[in-house]
């Protein structure tokens, strides 16, 4: 079943399942979100909410013309650039789209050991917000053997994180481009 078919009848309180990773075996950077929001689940696409700043930030970092890119091309651009994208959680129960509404007792992490086995070039994990970092630390870190990686939390690209404007978020997210330059 496709992600969009599996998540098409999403109500405000729902059991959510994340998407497969966007990956390339030569990825050097992994960006982890927590769990896709309702707009993304309905669209079957990462960061589909029109006000989420993830794709505009990636376009700026990778010098791409975002409006001209289809979702499939955006996915390819990440993979070609050495960026893998996934969510910490494989599934959870949540009311609405906010990470704070994830019922902690229902949170199930994605299967990271095979992912890390396939991606031996990874040097950095960047968390898209505090919730992704928190879920990773609770569900994954310390429970599995991790390769030597650098971890960094970045400000959430979610429209719910309005404390920073686009330029401030972009400045922080430049760490992704710097990591890619260090490892190329």
Image: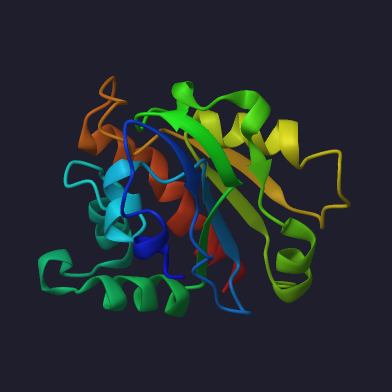
Q: How many marks?
A: 0
Q: Is residue 103 left or right of residue 161?
A: right
* Quadrant (top left, top right, bottom left, bottom right) of the C terminus: bottom right
Name the residue furthest left: 67
Q: Quadrant of residue 173?
A: top left
Residue 103 drawn at (x, y percent):
56, 24
Q: Is residue 45 visible?
A: yes
Compared with 60, 34 (above or below) is: above
Q: Is residue 47 visible?
A: no
Name the residue furthest front: 9
Compared with 86, 139 (above or below) is: above
Residue 135 drawn at (x, y percent):
63, 33
Camera-side residue of 35 and 13: 13
Q: Residue at x 35, y 29 (%)?
A: 96
Residue 12 drawn at (x, y percent):
32, 31
Q: Is residue 152 left or right of residue 171?
A: right
Q: Quadrant of residue 167?
A: top left
Compared with 149, 2 (above or below) is: below
Q: Residue at x 72, y 57 (%)?
A: 111
Compared with 105, 34 (above or below) is: below
Color style of the picture: rainbow
Q: Residue at x 52, y 28 (%)?
A: 130
Q: Is residue 15 left or right of residue 78?
A: right
Camera-side residue of 114 and 14: 14
Q: Residue at x 11, y 66 (%)?
A: 67
Q: Quadrant of residue 148?
A: bottom right
């Amino acid at each position: 079943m496709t992600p969009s078919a599996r998540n098409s009848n999403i109500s405000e309180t729902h059991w959510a399942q994340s998407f497969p990773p966007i990956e390339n075996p030569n990825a050097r950077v992994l960006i982890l979100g927590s769990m896709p929001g309702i707009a993304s689940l309905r669209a079957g696409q990462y960061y589909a909410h029109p006000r989420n700043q993830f794709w505009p930030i990636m376009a700026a970092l990778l010098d791409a013309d975002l409006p001209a890119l289809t979702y499939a091309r955006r996915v390819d651009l990440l993979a070609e650039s050495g960026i893998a994208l996934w969510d910490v959680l494989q599934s959870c129960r949540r009311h609405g789209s906010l990470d704070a509404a994830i019922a902690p007792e229902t949170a199930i992490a994605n299967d990271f050991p095979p992912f890390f086995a396939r991606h031996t070039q990874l040097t950095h994990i960047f968390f898209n917000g505090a919730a992704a970092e928190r879920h990773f630390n609770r569900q994954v870190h310390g429970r599995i053997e991790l390769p030597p990686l650098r971890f960094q939390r970045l400000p959430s690209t979610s429209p719910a994180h309005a404390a920073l404007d686009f330029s401030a978020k972009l400045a922080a997210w430049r760490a992704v481009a710097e990591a890619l330059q260090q490892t190329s």
